[in-house]
């Protein structure tokens, strides 16, 4: 979805598929009766030639009725990270009528082999609202298989009154620390020191912690 007119407007409200109550919901958001708190489930490219299948007819629309998915694991925000391309709007992005701050994450290993990520979120604005804390894990230095620069491993949503703070937990399942090893036909853990980042979108990750995975 391209927006060549974006610089001429002050805000964009994307309602996706709001259903039969869509008009009422839209009015409530536009008039400020409700604070928007949704996040994008995909990255919006800034131009037609700035996405994973642009310029490659084998990927899209296909050649001789066949499509080749040669991008592998680098789709969506993973492709934008790999190619160092800035999207129009990143995965996980979403604005609000208020503002939020997040503390640096505290990370501990769980008894099941996963991670427990703890973050304190503060509503630093003048309106009640909801924020989605997103956690992304960096690549393992011990893995030779293709890896994303970072991947979403967990998230949680928190509602806060103006000026209120809450400590929230993002539980990262053990599977999120692993990758599929085709040679052994099994899941294997990506060990070593890995970067755990938290924030409000895939492009807004102001806080981080190094995590040792074994």
Image (cartoon, grey):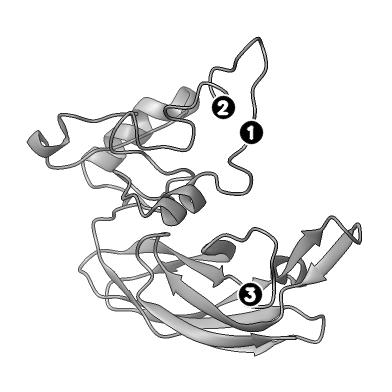
Secondary structure under the numbered disc 1 in the rendered image: loop
Q: CA distance from mark 1 to mark 2?
A: 6 Å
Residue 42 drawn at (x, y percent): 47, 43
Q: Residues within 10 Å of mark 2 (few under 14, many from 20)?
A: some
The quarter of the rendered structure image containing the C terminus is bottom right
Residue 127 drawn at (x, y percent): 25, 64
Residue 164 drawn at (x, y percent): 34, 79
The correct choice, above or below, for 196 with respect to 67 in the image is below
Report the residue at 56% width, 60% height from top: 148
Q: Quadrant of residue 186?
A: bottom right
Q: Quadrant of residue 55?
A: top left
Residue 190 drawn at (x, y percent): 71, 74
Compare residues 197 and 41 and report the one nearer the observer.
197
In the drawing, what numbered circle is on residue 140? 3
The residue pinned by badge 1 equals 69
The correct choice, above or below, for 81 with respect to 125 in the image is above
Report the residue at 48% width, 23% height from top: 20
Are the residues tagged 1 and 2 within 8 Å (C-beta)?
Answer: yes
């Amino acid at each position: 979805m391209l927006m060549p007119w974006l610089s001429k407007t002050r805000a964009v409200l994307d309602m996706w598929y709001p259903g039969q109550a869509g008009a009422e919901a839209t009015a409530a958001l536009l008039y400020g009766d409700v604070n928007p708190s949704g996040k994008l489930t995909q990255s919006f490219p800034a131009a037609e030639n700035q996405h994973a299948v642009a310029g490659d007819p084998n990927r899209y629309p296909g050649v001789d009725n066949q499509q080749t998915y040669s991008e592998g694991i680098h789709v969506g925000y993973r492709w934008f990270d790999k190619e160092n391309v800035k999207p129009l709007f990143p995965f996980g992005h979403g604005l609000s009528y208020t503002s939020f701050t997040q503390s640096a994450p505290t990370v501990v290993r769980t008894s099941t082999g996963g991670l427990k990520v703890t973050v304190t979120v503060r509503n630093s604005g003048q309106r009640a609202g909801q924020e989605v804390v997103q956690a992304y894990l960096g690549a393992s230095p011990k893995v030779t298989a293709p890896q994303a620069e970072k991947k979403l491993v967990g998230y949680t949503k928190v509602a806060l009154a103006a000026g209120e703070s809450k400590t929230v937990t993002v539980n990262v399942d053990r599977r999120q620390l692993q990758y599929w090893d085709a040679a052994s036909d099994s899941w294997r853990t990506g060990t070593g020191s890995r970067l755990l980042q938290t924030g409000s979108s895939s492009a807004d990750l102001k806080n981080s912690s190094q995590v040792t995975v074994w």
